[in-house]
Amino acid sequence: MRLPAFLRPRTAKQLAGQAGEDQALIYLQQQGLQLLERNFRCKGGEIDLLMQDGKALVFVEVRMRSEKKFGGAAASIGTAKQKRLIIAAQIYLQRYSMPPPCRFDVIAFDDKEMTWLKNAIEA
């Protein structure tokens, strides 16, 4: 019998990803954004961070790469991943009778260098 996900030990990659999300969250909060939800999961996909920036709802994808090979962390968000993010955002937005203005941002870590890309994904 397989253990539920919350009882399984986390891999080194998962722990590194969690640390990256923690760092991204702290940075975005320092920039004035407020956390609404973390790791929103649905059938369509997952959104790492849901933040409020003024009146805008910000869907944040955090990506990490140890090197900038093949374009780095931001370039690793391909068309399929973008579609999953958009579907997850659409599902999340069903909570609102009047959805707020939205954008998709990316926090990209290439080795230890962090870059914040606002409006990184067109929906």
Image: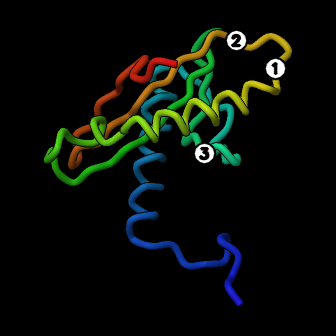
Q: In the rendered structure, find residue 100 and report the number of the disc placed on it.
A: 2
Q: Is residue 57 left or right of residue 121?
A: right
Q: In the rendered structure, find residue 73 and report the number of the disc placed on it.
A: none
Above or below: residue 10 compared with residue 72:
below
Which amino acid lies under the numbered mark 1 shown in the image of this protein? Tyr
Q: Nearer the viewer, residue 41 or 114?
A: 41
Which amino acid lies under the numbered mark 3 shown in the image of this protein? Gly
- As measured in the structure, the alpha-carbon distance from the residue carrying label 3 to the one carrying label 1 is 19 Å
Give residue 58's quadrant in the image: top right
The image position of residue 116, as x and y in percent, is 35, 27
Nearer mark to the viewer, of 3 and 1: 3
The answer to the question of whether label 1 and label 2 lie on touching residues, with beta carbons closer than 8 A, is yes
The residue to which callout 1 is attached is 96
Q: Residue at x 21, y 49 (%)?
A: 111
Q: Is residue 110 left or right of residue 18?
A: left
Above or below: residue 21 compared with residue 33:
below
The image position of residue 103, as x and y in percent, is 53, 18
The residue to which callout 3 is attached is 45
Nearer mark to the viewer, of 2 and 3: 3
Q: Residue at x 72, y 31 (%)?
A: 92
| Circle 3 residues within 10 Å: few <14, some 14–19, many ≥20 | some
What secondary structure is marked by label 2? loop
Which amino acid lies under the numbered mark 2 shown in the image of this protein? Pro
Mark 3 and mark 1 lie on one chain; the one further toward the N terminus is 3
What secondary structure is marked by label 1? loop
Q: Nearer the viewer, residue 51 or 95?
A: 95
What secondary structure is marked by label 3? strand
Q: Is residue 13 left or right of residue 45?
A: left
The image position of residue 24, as x and y in percent, is 43, 38
| Circle 2 residues within 10 Å: few <14, some 14–19, many ≥20 | few
Q: Nearer the viewer, residue 17 or 99?
A: 99
- As measured in the structure, the alpha-carbon distance from the residue carrying label 1 to the one carrying label 2 is 8 Å
